[in-house]
Amino acid sequence: MNFRRTRMPPAFFVAAVFAIALSGCASLGPDGSPGTAADAGNDDFVTSRPRVDSRDELIVVFTPGKVELDFRLSIMANEAQIFTAIYEGLFTYHPATALPVPALAEDWNISPDGSEWTFTINRDARFSNGDRITSDDFRRSWLSLLEPEREAPYSNLFDVIEGARDFRLGLATDPSGVGISAPDPRTLVVKLNAPTVFFPSMLCHHAFSPIHASMVDSQDWSGPGHVSSGAFRLAEINESRIVLEKNEFYWSAVDVVLSRIVVRFADDDEASALWNSGEALWIHGNVNFDTLVDHSGISVHALFGTHFYFLRSGEAPFDDYRVRRALALALPWDDIRAGYFLPTRTLVGSLAGYPRVAGIGDGDLAQARRLLALAGFPDGEGMPEIIFRITPSQDAARIVSMMGDAWLENLGVSSRIEVVPYDEYIDSLNLDGYHVGSMSWIGNFPDPYSFLKLWRADSNLNVARLSDDDYEELMERSMFEQGAERLATLAEAEQLLLERGVIMPITFLPSVNVIDRQELEGWFPSALGIHPFRYLGFREFRPLPNVAGAFFR
């Protein structure tokens, strides 16, 4: 779905629980859900945590970090989870399958050639202040996200829309040239460049939500004037917590069970304490597993996400794919990926119907040296020092140290390491001054395009600065194909990306949550890491037969 700050759980937890996650690494099914999933806990396990017989609010714990409420600028996975409460577009994610579910779209029609979609806006759609949501709200919001000066991270998602790419790049300045029109308050017409099979799935993403007119040009989305389109509204936000209250104007408010959600930002130990006390029912972030008194809530499943390193390709000599491939072929991949239970040679996780990609994983020193010499750097002579930019992670230090040692020993290329604090790292990837960085990425929707679109030359998320005509041709061709033919083209694009040394995959991502599913319902393992708040609610507690309720308190 978005960038993810990745800190691996402690070693004992890896050994005890990640083996369970291994079985959850099957392919995503045709419905977009994980092929399998595993919970480390047992629903029948009698916990030692206090139970609360009645609640008027749900407390969720997130890892501390700045939250950007302007979804046009947001990029983090935690923000995406919060957005499931306060923002909603034409479609939303089904809580169990991640399939698109109609939300603010009451109905829609598709032209015979698949290139024009006409949506009817839900007649009961209201913003959190009671104002009606109209088709023009969608048009105005989408165009504001596409404004070139905004440099919205997800603006290239809109490239499937006629004229959107040229408008966001400043090549065209007339918004009327973008294929988004609102002929009347309840009708939104979207013209696409080509039939796009994943369009409804993509419309689930928060980037396609409507923005209230009062907030389009606002620089502060955290104040009392915040207006939203989702099942909840913002009541309070500060460094320690976010409070969300039910939006009584929401079109389906009668189906929303929760009246109040409190998102607490807590470090590992405080998160454990909130779980142990029974206050928090869900930890969606880092936690100290050593101090949990009850492990029954630990849930592990495979994400449609990958942790990888990338080699920036926008400047010499790294713009020559022979140099990049030489560097990739000189690495000890088995040693680098050692210790991961979900190691991968590929970028895109397994998907139903998606061809198997060979990926990158077999070194070839002879070929690496030949390629480097052909590129004009025999025995590494003339190659610049390679700069790694990493977080203060022991695992990152281990990996880049192995990379640097291999390049020096095998190719005569030197390197050095630059460490950037966690809370500054994502922003630093867009700055110059380094050659190798790392990312963890979760797909926005269950389709290879969700990963491969990142590396288009004009993508705002192309931190590798890749510009490859062969890659562009394959990606463009895929937009006019369907079914197996389209997936085969995308697999070819992925293989090219890996063979040319842009992306160096390390491991598929597991999702680790601590969740009390005895008290909370509507939460399901999600391959996209998304658990829509609107579906969550408290279970009615019933003691087991012949067991006194007091036993659980």
Image (cartoon, helix red, strand yellow):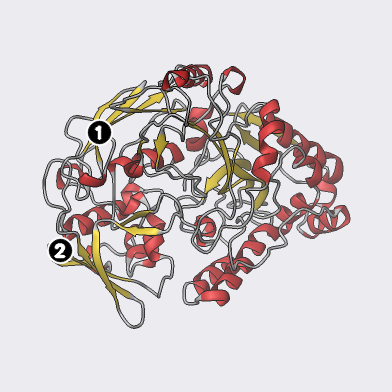
Question: Are discs 1 and 2 less than 8 Å apart at CB?
Answer: no
Task: Please report whichever mark, 1 or 2, sits nearer to the chain's N-terminal start.
Answer: 2
- Image quarter where the C terminus lies is top left
Q: Position of residue 56 (x, y in %)?
A: 28, 27
Single out the residue that lies furthest toward the bottom.
Answer: 112
The secondary element bearing badge 2 is classed as loop
Examine the rendering and report whether any part of residue 332 can be seen.
no
Q: CA distance from mark 1 to mark 2?
A: 29 Å
Q: Position of residue 438 (x, y in %)?
A: 61, 41
Q: Position of residue 319 (x, y in %)?
A: 63, 55
Q: Nearer the viewer, residue 128 or 517?
A: 517
Q: Which residue is mark 2?
A: 186
Q: Nearer the viewer, residue 458 or 38?
A: 38
Q: Amino acid at mark 2?
A: Arg
Which residue is located at x 77 percent, y 40 percent? 338
Crowding at dot 1, Cα within 10 Å, few <14 / some 14-19 / many 20+, comes out as: some
Crowding at dot 2, Cα within 10 Å, few <14 / some 14-19 / many 20+, comes out as: some
Which residue is located at x 25 percent, y 33 percent? 259
Rendering quarter of residue 162: bottom left
The secondary element bearing badge 1 is classed as loop
Q: Nearer the viewer, residue 387 or 544?
A: 544
146 left or right, relative to 225? right
Q: Amino acid at mark 1?
A: Ser
Examine the rendering and report whether any part of residue 462 can be seen.
yes
Q: Which residue is mark 1?
A: 259
Which residue is located at x 17 percent, y 41 percent? 128
374 left or right, relative to 69? right
Q: Nearer the viewer, residue 152 or 301?
A: 301
Which residue is located at x 35 percent, y 34 percent? 540
